[in-house]
Image (spheres, rainbow, N blue to C red):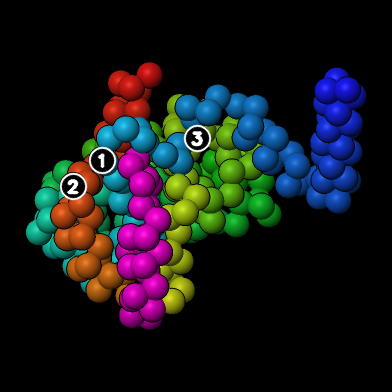
Amino acid sequence: MNKKILIIVLLIILSLIGCLYLSNTTYFKTHIAIFLIDSKQIIKYGPKNQKVIALTFDDGPHPRFTPQILDLLKKYDAKATFFVLGRHVELYPTVIKRAVAEGHEIGNHTYTHIDIKNTSLKKLQNEFEKTQNIIFSVTGIKPKIFRPPFGFCTEKVIKLANQNDCKIILWSNHQDSKDWSNPGVQKIIKKTLSNVENGDIILLHDYVEGPSQTIEALKTILPELKNRGYEFVTISKLITLSSNNE
């Protein structure tokens, strides 16, 4: 009886996969590819048995917002990771120099925040390499971490990461406050604090259109998480801590 039930369940699963493939081949190929590759290459979490958190900021640097964020990070002895756009690094190199000097990590987020779904691997590679070279010219560092725009982790992204010996850094499923859309300071705070877990990678933005609500939210988020006993670490340190637990 149990064997019959198992066979039925497997048939249902296979049917659903078939429907998914027929209705949305791109989705199927993307997510199955992610499932099949080495999970160590795509990072969404750190160690669950340690009170560490990785704050990450996308799309910067911004000439006004990023320095204010750096001030807050310094105040609370917090390290973070900035996934930068090459074109913004070109415009505001001193901001990135400061971030590196203060112990923060820099990651590649492409040159223009390119739409990965509608571009070729060659164009994506050009955007990636251009940004790597710009970051290196400013900081002397070539990042080994890459966050694809919008978090799209397609076959192209996986191939790009493999070719450049980079890890793909996403964020924890419950840690996207959508701060870029200015949803309200309290919403950013609530989304971050109410869901926080050991090893989380938190997605925030230091470059937004219009006023930044992220800065005001950080004035509550940083001291509260510190009071809860969390240590703020860079992505590379988070990866190292995870490796040490294996």
Sequence-earlier tag: 3 or 2: 3
Q: Mark 3 belongs to which amino acid?
A: Ile
Is 208 contained in the magenta span? yes
> Under tag 1, what secondary structure?
loop
Badge 1 density bin: few <14, some 14–19, many ≥20, Cα 10 Å: some
Q: Which residue is mark 1?
A: 51
Q: Which mark is residue 229?
A: 2
Q: Residue at x 28, y 70 (%)?
A: 217
Is residue 238 or residue 117 the one in the foreground? 238
Q: Which residue is mark 3?
A: 42
Sequence-earlier tag: 1 or 3: 3
Residue 137 seen in this snapshot? no
Is residue 189 or residue 2 the one in the foreground? 2
Is 88 contained in the magenta span? no
Question: Which span is picked out in magenta?
Answer: 184-212
Q: Residue at x 63, y 32 (%)?
A: 35
- In the rendered view of the protein, which quadrant contains the N terminus? top right
Q: Is residue 59 left or right of residue 240?
A: right
Is residue 158 or residue 201 the one in the foreground? 201
Q: Residue at x 45, y 48 (%)?
A: 171
> Under tag 3, what secondary structure?
strand
Q: Mark 2 belongs to which amino acid?
A: Gly
